[in-house]
Amino acid sequence: MYRVETIRRLREARRLAVLTGAGVSAESGVPTFRSPEGLWSRFRPEELARVEAFLRNPDLVWAWYAHRRQIIRQVQPNAAHRILAALEDRYPDFTLITQNVDNLHRRAGSRNLIELHGNLERNYCIACARPWQEEDDEPQAVPRCPDCGGLVRPDVVWFGEPLPQEAWSRAEAAARRAEVFLVVGTSAVVYPAAWLPEIALESGAYVVEINPEETPLSGRVHDAIRERATVALEALWSMLES
Ligand code: NAD
Ligand code: ZN
């Protein structure tokens, strides 16, 4: 079930880039948005995850993020996060690009990490942009900036907002120069992140998808490994090390 060609490419490559999505954190107990029991079925994220919603009902949107922050603080990085961190030492040119906002890659030790959609652990004032750090208790109502009284929002990318430009350019460049590109645990439907595997394919990379489900990308990659992230990465890791 694991292709010899995939192991050979992973062994020989010097430039590896990886794109991860919510699926890589699923086994830590962070729900994905599109799973049946995921957050998106209980809440309508298109209603919550946008600036208009925040301005209309900041307390509700804040409470939703407070709830998500509470989940991520109770969980731990899993073997997939740890192996992706360890892979960094194997390649002279390694880039980990994530759509996740849960901070788990950083907690697992990844260093060359691009957070395309921001990070739930950071907040800032919408009026003066000053970073806001919570004290001990997570406030249930939206906090106000101590400097200017502006509303404090999470530092994540909402619907209708552009990606942070520098993060996007670095991600795009990594996808272009990668010899092997891994796509782990993403439904590959959220653009522009979903362009990255396309860019890698177009630039001649060997593209491997790890996902228990088929995605719109599956038909075009060189190897689609139908496995959970921890299982597939543990298997690939032990084959690389042997
Ligand atoms: P998604 O919810 O659209 O897709 C998750 C994918 O992971 C699915 O294709 C699913 O089949 C796969 N998956 C489920 N369990 C898996 C496992 N154990 N191993 C490997 N794959 C598994 O998530 P997305 O593609 O990341 O896009 C959704 C958006 O939601 C992103 O913008 C992201 O910022 C946000 N989001 C982030 C988090 C997080 O930070 N953990 C959680 C939910 C959503
Ligand atoms: Zn302010």
Image: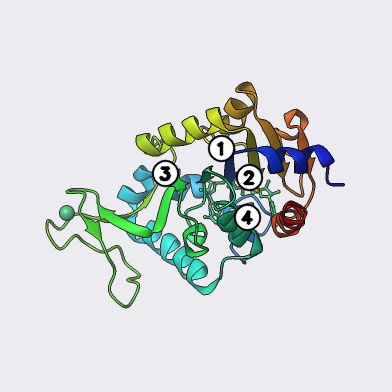
Q: Earlier in the sequence, mark 2 or mark 4?
A: 4
Sequence order check, earlier mark of 3 and 4: 4
> In the rendered view, does 61 fall on the left or right side of 149?
right
Does the numbered disc 2 mark a residue whose Cβ is under 8 Å from ligand 1?
Answer: yes
- x 51%, y 61%: residue: 104
Q: Residue furthest bottom?
A: 136
Q: Secondary structure at mark 2?
A: loop
Marker disc for residue 24: 4
Q: Earlier in the sequence, mark 3 or mark 1?
A: 3
Name the mark nearer the viewer: 2 or 1.
2
User: Any atom of ligand 1 within 8 Å of the CB at mark 4?
Assistant: yes
Taking the image as shown, residue 91 lies to the left or right of residue 232, namely left
Can residue 115 be seen here?
yes
- Residue in the picture at 70% in, 59% down: 230
* Residue designated by label 2: 186
Q: Viewer-proximal residue, 114 or 156? A: 114
Q: CA distance from mark 2 to mark 1?
A: 9 Å
The residue pinned by badge 3 equals 158
